[in-house]
Amino acid sequence: MTAEPIAQTPIPDHNELFSQEVYLEQAARKREFENPCGSDEVARVADWTKSWEYREKNFAREALTINPAKACQPLGAVLASLGFAKTLPLVHGSQGCVAYFRSHFARHFKEPVPAVSSSMTEDAAVFGGLNNLVEALQNATTLYKPEMVAVSTTCMAEVIGDDLFNFIGAAREKEAISEDFPVPFAHTPSFVGSHLTGYDAMLKSILGYLAERNTAERTPNGKVNVVPGFLPSVGDLRELHRLLSLIGVDYTILGDHSDTFDAPVNGEYDMYPGGTSLEAAGDAVNALGTVFLQGDSTKRTSDFVGAEWSGKTATTGLPVGVKATDRFVQAVAEVAGITVPEAITTDRGRLLDAMSDSYAYLHGKRVAVAGDPDLVVGLLEFMLELGMEPVHVVSTNGKEDFKQQAEAVLAASPFGSSATVWPGKDLWHLRSLMFTEPVDLVIGSTYLKYVARDTNTPLVRVGFPIFDRHHLHRLPTIGYAGSIELLSRLVNTVLDELDRNASDISYDVVR
Amino acid sequence: MTITPSRETTEAIIADVLAAYPPKTAKFRSKHLAANAPEGGKECEVKSNIKSRPGVMTVRGCAYAGSKGVVWGPVKDVVHISHGPVGCGQYSWGTRRNYFNGTLGVDSFVAMQVTTDFQERDIVFGGDKKLAQTCKEIAELFPLAKGISIQSECPIGLIGDDIDAVSRDSGKALNIPVVPVKCEGFRGVSQSLGHHIANDAIRDWVLGTGELETETPYDVALIGDYNIGGDAWASRKILEDMGLRVISQWSGDGTINELANAHKAKLNLIHCYRSMNYICTTMEEKYGIPFIEYNFFGPTKIVESMRAIAAAFDETIKAKTEAAIARYEESFEATRTRFRPRLEGKTVMLLVGGLRPRHTIGAYEDLGMEIVGTGYEFAHKDDYSRTNPELKAGVVLYDDPTAWELEEFARRLKPDLMGAGVKEKYVFHKMGLPFRQMHSWDYSGPYHGVEGFAIFARDMDIAINNPTWSLITPPWAASTSEEGAA
C-alpha cells in the first residue's frame, strides 16, 4: 500500500514555531531566570566586535583558537584508507574519535563510513593498547572481511607511545591475523598538523607497504600514477577519471574514494563499494611517473615517491581554472610521453567559453576565501583568471610555505594586489577581517555560514566540510569541466544577489 | 495482528547473527542481546555499560562527547573550551542542534568551536599556561561570557596537567566561574561517564551558588532536555500551561544562572534520566528536592506524565493540568486522524542514546506503529528495566550493538522504519529502508510536547511514504519479491 499524498495544512516546525507569539512570550518569561545581559549592552558589544579595535585584540590572540578551519590527523588517515579497495580503517586509541570521524564524513558525503576503533580505555592508558589492537584486528577481519586494514592512531595512543609496528607484529604472532594479511599503518598524532598531515601519512604508508609487498620484478607498466590528495568531492575524482581518459593515458589514481562515497541505493549495503585496487596500487611503483595534484596534502608521499620510485614525479597544484589545469594536463602528457590531444583543447575551450559568458559579473568582485592550503591556492589562481580580486586569504592549516605560494600567485596578477594572506588564522579572525574590510563574496566550507550571515556576505560553498547543502560533494570543482561548475556557483551567487537587491527598475529578465 | 516475532524466533535470530564473530567475542556479545519479556527478569536481561569490544564498529562515542557534546555544550552564556587537540571540538561543532535564544559570539557561544588547539610542544611541556592564557583571551574577546568550562580531551589526563589549579586561578582573576571538567575520552566505556563527570562538575563548581528573588510553591526545574530542534521549549510550554514556574532549564538554552539556582526548585522534572539522574539524586540528598521522570513524546505519555507531575502539587495545578490536557486533545486527535491511517501496522527498529529507545515507544504506538527492536548506545541496567515493560515479548533488545548486528537484525526483521544516528543512516538507505535520525531529529523538530508530536508524526509519514522507496527495483529486474510491495 502506498499512502496517497495529503493536502492539509502544513505542520509548522522549528523553522516557524519559535517566532510565534506564544514562544516569544515564553522566551521573555525565561529571561527572568537567566541573569541576562541587557539588550543595549548586547548591541553595544555586538557593534564593538565589528570594529578595528576588536580586530586588533582578536589578532593579538596567542593561545585561543576560535572556529578553526581544520580537523585532526586521523580523520585524514581514514579518508586515505577508504581510497583503497576493500580496506577497513582501524584507528588505534579512544573509540569516540572514530564515532566522530564516521559522523563527520557521513554528514559531508551523506554516505556510510565504515571504520573501526581499538576502543582503548583507562586500563589501556596505563598498560598500553597492545591487547586492544590485537583483538581489534581479529574482530574486524573476522566480521567485516576486509582485504586490508589500514591502522592510524588517536592522540591518546600517541601520548602513551604505543608502537604500531610491534603491536601489529604481535597480532600476527598471536594469529589474530594471518602472517601475510596486509596492515599498513601510520602514526597520526592529532597535535601535529591537520587532517591533511594524516591523509599524507596514511597514503605514504599504504603506497610504500603495497609496493614493498609487490615482490615481482620491477617492469615498467606504462602507466601514469595520479595522486589526488585530500579531495572532498567524489565529483573531483570522477572528473579526474574523465580528464585522464580524454588525455588518452593509461593511469592509476592512487587513493580513489569516488565509488566509496557514491554507492547506489539498490537494496543491498556493500561495505566496500570502491577504491583503488590493491593490485594496481602495488604496481604503481612500476609506473612511468607520478603526478601529484596537491603540494601540501601529499608532501611526504611525494618526497617518498620521488626518492624511492624510478619514474618521474611532478606536483602541479590543484587544477582549478585554466592555467592550473593546463599544467596538470601537460604534466600527465609529459610523463606519458604523448602530445596533448585535440579533445583536451576542446574541453579547455568550453571553460574559456563559460568564462567569456560570465566574466563581466565577476570582474573586480572582492572576495574572501578560507580553506585547506592547496584548495585556497587553486581558487586564488582561478579567481585571478576571472578578474576577481581576492582580499582576505585564510588557511588555518596553512603555514609559511602556503603564504609564499599564495603570495607568488597573487603577485603574478594585478588583480592580486588587494590581498593579504593569513596562514594559521581561524574563522574568528576572518570575521574581524570581513567586518573591517567588507567583501562581495566569501568562499569556503559550511562553517563559513556564520561569518557570512554576521557580515551579510553571500557564501559560495566549496571545500570541506559541506554539511548544509546537498550534492555539492558529487560535483567537480577541478579540471576544465569542474571549473565550469565552480564558475557557475560563483556567477550565479552574484546574480542571485543582484536579483535579491535589485530595484523594480533593474530587475532584469536576462542577465 | 502480531508483528513481533516470538521470543524463540528472536533467540534463534540472535544466535544466527552471533555466529559470525570469533568465539570469544560471540560469547561476550551474547550477553548484550536478548528477546524481550515484558515482565523483565533474568531471561531477558542484557548486560550494559560495559566496554565495547575492539574492532567491532561500536556506535558509541566518548566521555568528552557526553560532557561537552551533551551536558555542558548547550549552556549558552558559557564559553566551552575543547581543551586539547583540534579534532574533538571540530567534530562536535554545532552538530547537536542545541537551540538557544541569544546573539552568537556576543552573549551566547553554543555554536562555536573554541579550543586550545594543542601542538606537540603543549604535550611535551604541558598545557596549563596555554589554558590560563586562553581563559584570559576569552574574557577579553567575549566580555559578556558568564563563565568558562574546560572540556578535557584525552591528552590532558595523560600528561599530568593541573586544570583544577588553572580554573581556580583564572576564575579569581577573571571574576567568572571557570569550571574544569575531566571528561577525557578514554575514561569509562561510552558517553555515559562523561554525563556523570559533567554532572559532578556542576555540583562541585556551580550548583547552589545562585539565588531567586521570589519563590513560589510551583517552582520546578526542567532537567535533561537539550533543546534539540527546540524540544525544551515545547516541553516548557506544557509545564507553564500546567501553572508551574520553570526556574531552571538544564541545559538546552540554559544559562549558568539556571545551573546555579536549580536547588531552589520544589520539584525536579527529569526527561533524560540517563544523563542527569546524578544531579537529581544530589539535589534530593543535599536539598531534599524530589524528582520525577517524565516523558513528553506522544499524547499517551504526555498526558500520563502531566498527571503524574500534577499529583505532586495542589488542586490549582491539577485543575490547570486537566484544562491543558483538554485543550491539547484537539491537536492530538487531529494528528492521529491524519497520520495513523498512513502509519498503522508499520514496524520500527530503534538505536539511540540514553532515553529515546524507550521514551519514543509510546509516540510510535499512538500512531499505530510497533517497535520490533530497540537498544541503547550507553544505557545502564536501570534503563533496560524501564524498557522491558514498554515492549511486547520477543522484541529484540540490543545493547551497544555493532554495525554488523544492527544490519543483520534489520535484514531479518525487515522493519518499515529504522531510527538511529547519522553513522547508521546511509547504510539503511542503501538497503532501501526508510530512516529517521533520532538524535538530531534529522534536522527537524521539536519532537517533544504537543506541537512536537505533530512534527514527529509528519516526519515518520514522510520517511515511510515517500515514493522514492518504491523506485529502487528497476523494471527490467525479475521481481519475485513480495516484500517490496508490502
Image: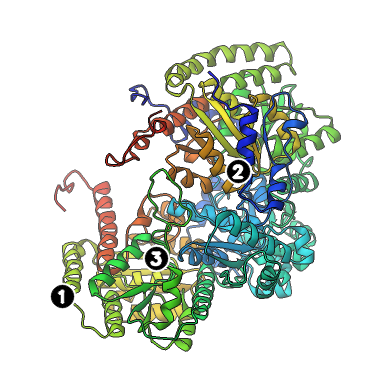
Residue indicated by mark 2: B17
For image coordinates 23% across by 71% down, the residue present is A246
Res. B75 in view = no
Q: Gap in Å between the C-alphas at discs 1 and 3?
A: 34 Å
Residue indicated by mark 1: A342
Q: Gap in Å between the C-alphas at discs 2 and 3?
A: 50 Å
Residue A321 sits in which quadrant?
bottom left
Label 3 lies in what chain?
A
Say whether mark 3 and mark 1 are on the same chain. Answer: yes
Q: On screen, B255 above or below B84?
A: above
Q: Which dot marks residue A369?
A: 3
Q: Quadrant of the N terminus of chain A?
A: top left
For image coordinates 20% across by 71% down, the residue present is A348
Q: Secondary structure at mark 3?
A: strand
Please name the amino acid that badge 3 sits on. Answer: Val
Q: Secondary structure at mark 2?
A: helix
Horizontal relation, residue A418 to residue A282: left or right: left
Q: Secondary structure at mark 1?
A: helix
Q: Nearer the viewer, residue A249 or B242?
A: A249
Residue A340 sits in which quadrant?
bottom left
For image coordinates 37% across by 82% down, the residue present is A287
For image coordinates 60% across by 39% down, the residue present is B352
Q: Nearer the viewer, residue A59 or B236?
A: B236
Which mark is in front, 2 or 3? Answer: 2
Q: Nearer the viewer, residue B395 or B48?
A: B395
Q: Which dot marks residue A65?
A: none
